[in-house]
Amino acid sequence: MAYQKVPIGTSNPGLTMILVDQSYSMRDVYGEGQKKDVAAMAVNRVIYEIVLACQSGEKIKDRVYMAVIGYGDNIDVLIEGKISEIAENPKETLEIMKKEPDGAGGLVEVKALMPVWIKSKAENGTPMGQAFDVAYRVAEEWVQKHPDNFPPIVINISDGEPNDPDHTRDAAMSLMNIETNDGKLLLLNAHISDLNAGEILLPNNNSGLHDEYAKFLFEISSELPQTLIEAAKNVGFSPPDNARGFLFNAGAENLIKLLHFGSLGTLR
Amino acid sequence: MTETTIFKVNILHSFIYPKMGEELSDCQDAQDVNCALNRFSVADGVSRSFYPAIFSKILTDYFCNGDTPTNKDLFKHKNWHEWLKISQNKWQELISQKVNNTSKYYIKNRYYNKEHAGATFAGIEFFEKDQCIYWNAMIIGDSCIIHFDKFHHKTNKYLIQNTSDFNFTPGYFPSLDVKENPFQPEFLLDMTASIDDIFIIATDAISKWILLLIEQSQTQILANIHNLSSEIVDKFRIDTLSPIENDDVSMLVLKIEQS
């Protein structure tokens, strides 16, 4: 039976990879900012949450390997490595004051340190297929070294159609065919939009998808194993049986939820 | 806690083992023993809380070895608030040092947020009075004490009675003086024991498994519980009939013997 090697731990680590669209259209307004800023914030936040999930005392346990790949004017491997190394090397750590409940009905300002690994960026086109090619290289190398572990999870965040749909389809299919002895690589796609309409969340068939691009993304999104179905429910989704890891026209809140359950759902 | 003349406590087995996929150094459970004082304890640090392994170690160590009137008179006065405060202060002191000596944002943030550790706990002391053997215990959460008479005819379970009573929100000692903490320990006082009785003190995963074995009348496995090994735990973690849940485990098997 596939997808049994959970919870992921130090002796059977996992690989989580996030692909971020950094094309020009990511400058569009999204929620209270631009898509590029929301995407960078969401990715930084989920990396921080993974760090916390792997923390034991002062130590960050290497339960996960991570890679973040940005695609726009270039294909950039923004981070890659063990979570312990990533945790120690944010690009910068911002000191902020945030408001927290004071326990008596009011709010109190609390100092907090905010690590930043990914800076927002939006230039040029959408070379999604080439980003899948790079993800293939990273995942394939990792699988060679960890053939019995839970398979890699790849989360792709994008707001638009790829430059080369045919190559993108082929590259995605190749990526989804990478496997360990515990199952095939899981590819999750989050198509983000500020339309506030037509949001499609974790569907299990494409009959309600009238958009050709939505059908394409459905096709290149993996069916979620039970572990991730449960994790998706825990963050507030209501996935049907055989749901795919796919959001279409997703708002910022649902993007963050997908990143959360996709990255943390196998850690517990 | 006076010197005993009619019995001694033999530690048949002390066992600690991490959850599947983790190293022993990652284990949040702790245990300690003091055969001179006949005190024995286990604790289970709440995973994802802040430095739980340190707190569970402080609790078990202080219960077994703490040379203070508060600890010595714990069962006499049931002064658990005062008793806990000493362990909380120790934890706070250690954590403050760690935070001051680190630049790690993920540690400092949790400290700024006043996060704390939590740990379930079971501690037992044996003593004699008028040529009889007695024991006292303090338990909070789902760490358990299971008392078998020498023929395994009678089994007493403390505090949890059935496997269905385990849940994901057990009581625990917090490592900070949390005002809204709703939990408090239970005391078992002047309980009786006999020569050749067996006591198991264990954190939740093994406690639940032992209760399951009792419910299933798996007497053969129970009779060999003092031989529990990492191989056996690994085997039962994937057993479908009598599974051990995938969690850190800590267990002491004690036998009352004639001195």
Image (cartoon, coloured by chain):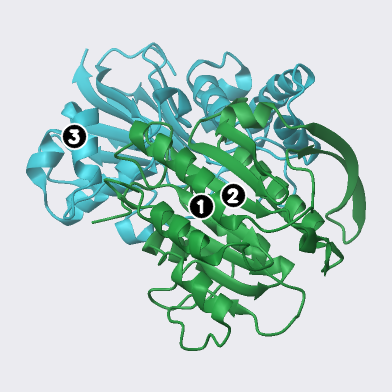
* Label 1 neighbour load within 10 Å: few <14, some 14-19, many 20+: many
Q: Can you say whether A218 is above or below B13 in the image?
A: below
Q: Chain A's colour?
A: green
Dot 2: chain letter: A
Q: Position of residue A105 (x, y in %)?
A: 88, 62
Which label number is shown at residue B232? 3
Judging depth in this view, the residue of B116 and B182 nearest the camera is B116
Q: Return the mark for residue A18.
A: 2
Tell me if A141 is positioned left or right of A27 in this view. left
In the rendered image, the residue lying farthest to the left is B220
Is B184 or A180 nearer to us in this picture? A180
Asked if the residue at tag 1 contacts the one at tag 2, i.e. Cβ–Cβ closer than 8 Å, the answer is: yes
Residue A166, percent across and down?
A: 50, 65
* Same chain? Circles 1 and 3: no
Q: Residues within 10 Å of mark 3 (few under 14, many from 20)?
A: few
- Disc 2 or disc 3, which is closer to the eye? 2
- Residue B256 occupies which quadrant of the picture? top left
Q: Is residue B64 left or right of residue A253?
A: left
Specify the colour of chain B. Answer: cyan
Residue identified by numbered label 1: A154
Q: Quadrant of residue A236?
A: bottom right
Chain ID of residue with mark 1: A
Q: Look at 19% across and 51% down and name the residue there.
A: B242
For label 3, the SS is helix
Rendering coords of residue B131 (x, y %)? 28, 22
**What is the distance, in whole Å, between disc 2 and disc 3 at their CAs?**
39 Å
| Mark 1: amino acid | Val
In the rendered structure, which amino acid carries the disc numbered 3? Answer: Ile
